Image (cartoon, helix red, strand yellow):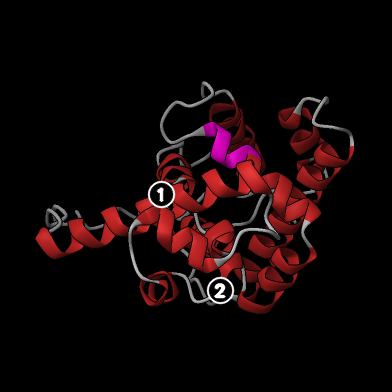
Amino acid sequence: MDGMTPASRTPAPEAAPRPPGLRERKKLRTRLAIRQAAFALFREQGYDATTVERIAERADVSPSTVARYFPAKEDIVLTDAYEPLLEELLRHRPADEPVPETLRWVLRRVTALPPGGPPHRDDLLLRVRLLAEVPAVRARLLESGSGTARLMRRALAARTGRDESDPEVRLYAMGLTGALLEAMALWVEGGCRDDLARLADHALDVFRDLPATR
């Protein structure tokens, strides 16, 4: 597709987001505690050896609570704290910047985060490994759809003035997501020695910009 400038229309100002209430904050803390416990156990004993019961014990919650937040163990891997950051960065790049160039900039920012620094680059690297190495995680990704692809659709729709349900937006978002996942798989297969941002650059080279609505 040939690049086009985004729709020339002034978006209506958005209302200030409502601060999360006590219930929302408690849910977020519980979700983060479960994820942190799971990722610690994955590092210590491996993914397959880690049960939902052990995750619940480490997070000091019941197994039913883990299941309420993450219906399958694989979902703990497929959702993470990076997605809000990715969406925020995507939304705040220049509106006339081609989408592949925006993604290059975002990926360089994310992969340059210091180890252990918020939002935990180490967790991202472990997630990438599990996506590439654990068949059950990849199968769940195909079954349930990718949260990254959904946020990509939202960001692309906002940038181009298109609807999220637009077939081209959906195909473009899934194509980008698949290409980036494959770049991550190549990175893991190479022993994580290559430059992940460089591999992602190669993956993005095959994409042109997504045209805006006319």
Under circle 1, the secondary element is helix
Q: Residues within 10 Å of mark 1 (few under 14, many from 20)?
A: few
Residue 2, horizontal then vertical, whole percent = 73, 52
Under circle 2, the secondary element is loop
Q: Quadrant of the N terminus?
A: bottom right
Residue 123 sits in which quadrant? top right
Q: What kind of residue is marked 2?
A: Ala
**Stretch of the chain drawn in magenta:** 121-125
Residue 93, horizontal then vertical, whole percent = 46, 36
Which residue corresponds to the image point at 39% horizontal and 77% vertical from the top-left?
A: 64
Task: Give the side of residue 45 with respect to residue 59, left or right.
Answer: right
Q: What kind of residue is marked 1?
A: Pro
User: From mark 2 to mark 1, how far is it between C-alphas?
Assistant: 21 Å
Residue 191, horizontal then vertical, whole percent = 85, 32
> Circles 2 and 1: CB distance less than 8 Å?
no
Q: Residues within 10 Å of mark 2 (few under 14, many from 20)?
A: some
Q: Which residue is mark 1?
A: 84
Does the magenta run of residues contain 96?
Answer: no
Q: Nearer the viewer, residue 53 or 160?
A: 53
Q: Which residue is mark 2?
A: 72
Q: Residue furthest right?
A: 190
Which residue corresponds to the image point at 57% horizontal and 33% vertical from the top-left?
A: 122
